[in-house]
Amino acid sequence: MRLINVHSMSVEEFIGRNIPPYGILSHTWEGSEVSYDEMRVGTARSKEAFHKIEMACKLASEDGLAYVWVDTCCIDKSSSAELTEAINSMFVWYKRATVCYVYLSDLESSADVSTALKDCRWFSRGWTLQELIAPQKVNFFDQNWQFKGCKNRLLEEISGITGISSTILEHLAPLSSITVAARLSWAACRETTREEDAAYCLLGIFDVNMPLLYGEGTKAFRRLQEEIIKAECDLSIFAWMAEPSQSGQPGRRYSGILAESPMEFSGCRGIIKANESTFHADFSITNRGIRMHTGLLILETINSEGRLCVQDLGCFKDSDGPYHLGVRLRKCGPDMFVRKSPYSLVTLQSEPWNNISLYRTIYILSKLPEIPHLPHSQMLQRENDLIISCRTSAMQIRLPPGFESYNARPTSHFDEHDKLFFATGDALHSWCFIQLEGENWLNGKKIRVSCFFLCINWNSQSRKLVSTLVNKSSCDPVLISQFVAGVEHEQHNGMPPVMRNLGVFGIPVQDCVVLKERGPTLRISHSIRKVFQPDICNNEMYQVDITLESLLTAQEATTY
């Protein structure tokens, strides 16, 4: 670490634990700043910006300090290795400083600090965020270097401007006590000259390190999020919302789970971690996306969205009460998801754990494949292709009004939104099982229906398709569970032998179920046909229609 001697104005280097007490300057860069080379060769005094260095040294000397650190001239920026080390160490350097001198070059001496502070450029720059938080003692000076107050005396004004709580500013609580989303919101409206610095200036806020790769653009912020995920188990990092489209056209329907910039966390102030969550395991970065073992929430909607898959983020906004926040997900492959409608979050108004699906390992794409700029109509088609591109075949279940489906297996290959099972090019997943429940009024009487649909070989080219619709009460639930578990266990070995004899498990092969209820008789039937629906499958697919019929007008029906 290099420091400026306040008496000789020369730069001295210190290594390890031999670093003396020092003051540190925080400012906004303007015009031609003094460089390390200019300090080294003695030409720095000829530059107007040298006055800032002189004043920082003067203030440090008055505070009994022999050294001061200034970012413009204490780092050799011609060395990429030194620059990387300095940026990764900068939060610690500010934290260890005895005092930080903040020079506000646009704050007039006559200005009222309580009202003028918010308009200072210093509060809009990315790098100054850590320079505000890290030091214990921060003194503010106007454009004429007149003292205007210290951080601890201006807490209310600074907290109002930045959204940072006074407990953090006063070092009464660790940064880790604030959710990741809330910390990222502090940087949402700040700017940096280099695009990559929007990520690099936040390394210390999250106590992570990473190499600097100037030229990588927005990838830097994605890498930062990945490093944060490695360090903290906090799902609030996914609580961002995409910025609205500037063109007036609807924005993209899908996105990766990682944000593109800190700006997308602008709505995350006040996000607090919940005490209870549906999520109890870790998550990690893989080459397939974000891997997590979780139970998704399956929510019904009253609009065209149909069923929603929602990941509970285990956090809530302090202004909205204890309602958890979640993100919509859409399945785009076996246990593979993308984020849907990234312009908003889901507010879970009731106990979210009442609607949890089976816990399983899923993957969420961290980013989408590159899509070229296209007219809006073509863009929607390309986004739809993302969802259906893996579907070589499909079997869609269509239910009568008042009926719901649940416990679909294999879960990995069932899409809640389109209510269909899909195959991905092989015959391994050529079976499906789904439970159906509903109520139907017949001649003034309510009949409760509970059955399951099972189909085998629907994605096989060499075996005959077998399907059946069975009343749950007519089968041994233990045998049914054993059948489903056996199929799921063996499915990766080709056609499971357990499929070949349904009778062993007490499962009849039949087209319909007939229910009698003291007079009224109801028949529930299924029919299968091949259709071509290019909006949900690339190829010809199966469509299963579940229908209800009163046997008062169908006496020829046979009771099974």
Image (tube, rainbow, N blue to C red):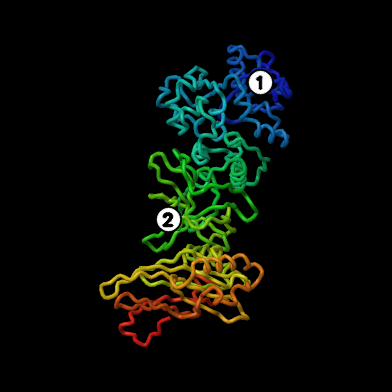
Question: As rendered, which of 98 and 431 lies closer to the eye?
Answer: 431
- The x, y position of residue 132, in whole percent, is 53, 28
Task: Determine the secondary structure under disc 2.
Answer: loop
> Does the image show residue 437?
yes
Q: Can residue 344 be seen in this snapshot?
A: no
Quadrant location of the C terminus? bottom left
Marks 1 and 2, the one that precedes in the sequence: 1
Residue drawn at 66 percent across, 20 percent down = 45
In the picture of the structure, the residue carrying the numbered disc 2 is: 248
Does 123 appear above or below 480? Answer: above
Residue depicted at x 42% and y 20%:
110
Real-space Cα distance between discs 1 and 2?
A: 52 Å
Residue 274 at what x, y percent from top left?
Answer: 46, 41
Q: Nearer the viewer, residue 104 or 42?
A: 104
Residue beneath disc 1: 45
Q: Residue 5 shows which numbered tag?
A: none
Mark 1 against mark 2, which lies toward the viewer? 2
